[in-house]
Image (cartoon, helix red, strand yellow):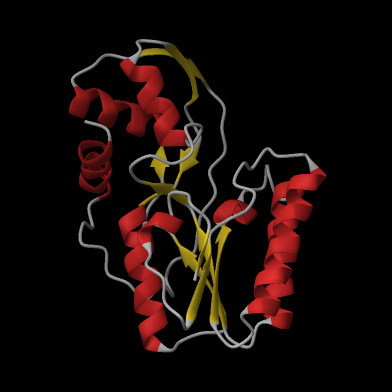
Amino acid sequence: MIIGKGLIAKQFQNHDDVVYFASGVSNSSETDKNQFLREENLVRETLNKYPKQLFIYFSTCSIYDSSKYNSLYVLHKLHMEELIKENAENYLILRVSNAVGEGGNPNLLMNYLARQIKSNATITIHNNATRNLVDVEDVRDITLQYIASNNWNKIVNVAYIENFFIPEIIQSFEENLNLKTNIISEDKGEHYSIDVHELDYEFTIQDKYEYLANLIKKYYR
């Protein structure tokens, strides 16, 4: 059973013994409590409807971002994680970083940057800010690998092995789209690390710059 229609949900096929819960609040700046309540109600409803199935919940690595730790979004996601741990017989909670793929929310970082660069718009960037980008197909493969392993009832950080500085992302867009970006740079931004040393997955591309270039060629060129 697939709950959701977004970027991650589209990577999976229906299976009677697995619930993929990929629907809910995706905007980390969300403040409307009704949106959080809608997701909570759907989680509870789905848990009650499929009590014996493995419950896969796609959470967020934003919990490691000190600038968002006390946000309503992060507190809500942590609450959903606890709800699932307490009520699901078998579960996998996958904390995903910034998934990149075809389509998806237009306000996702890479979609936003691609749109601004292609339209020759001016972009204000924070030089010290980093983001962790992970191919949505890697998210899919990691999920399926953990399902097959029966290594369940745990929280897994699903992220690439290194972060990317925003200027590195802009530069890769320029090189791979053969475009020049209008940039206003500010000496601001935060870096936060995501611990992936326990992630049981081997990325095909280990070089961060090659991995980034591949994402842009694959989804934006």
Query: Is residue 82 in view?
Result: no
Q: Which of 45 and 157 is in front in this view?
A: 45
Query: Is 39 positioned to the left or the right of 122 in the image?
Result: right
Work out whether residue 15 or residue 194 is closer to the camera in this orientation and state it: 15
Q: In this view, does 151 lie to the left or right of 87?
A: left
Count numbered badges in the picture. Answer: 0
68 to 165, vertically: above or below: below
Looking at the picture, how far across and down is residue 134, in whole percent? 37, 52
Q: In this view, does 163 lie to the left or right of 137?
A: right
Q: In which quadrant will I find the C terminus?
A: top left
User: Could you tell me residue 13's position as x and y percent?
Assistant: 37, 67
Instruction: Give the residue drawn at x 43%, y 49%.
Output: 7
Who's the residue at 42% across and 77% down the image? Answer: 15
Which of the 4 quarters of the picture holds residue 197? Answer: bottom left
Q: Residue at x 22, y 52 (%)?
A: 207
Q: Position of residue 107 (x, y in %)?
A: 51, 32
Q: Which residue is drawn at 27% across and 43% down?
A: 215
Q: In the figure, residue 51 lies in which quadrant?
A: bottom right
Say if 185 sits above or below 175 in the image.
above
At which x and y percent is residue 167?
38, 28
Look at the picture and state if 198 lies above or below 101: below
Residue 19 seen anywhere in this rendered image of the structure? yes
* Quarter occupied by residue 63: bottom right
Which residue is nearer to you in this view: 175 or 187? 175
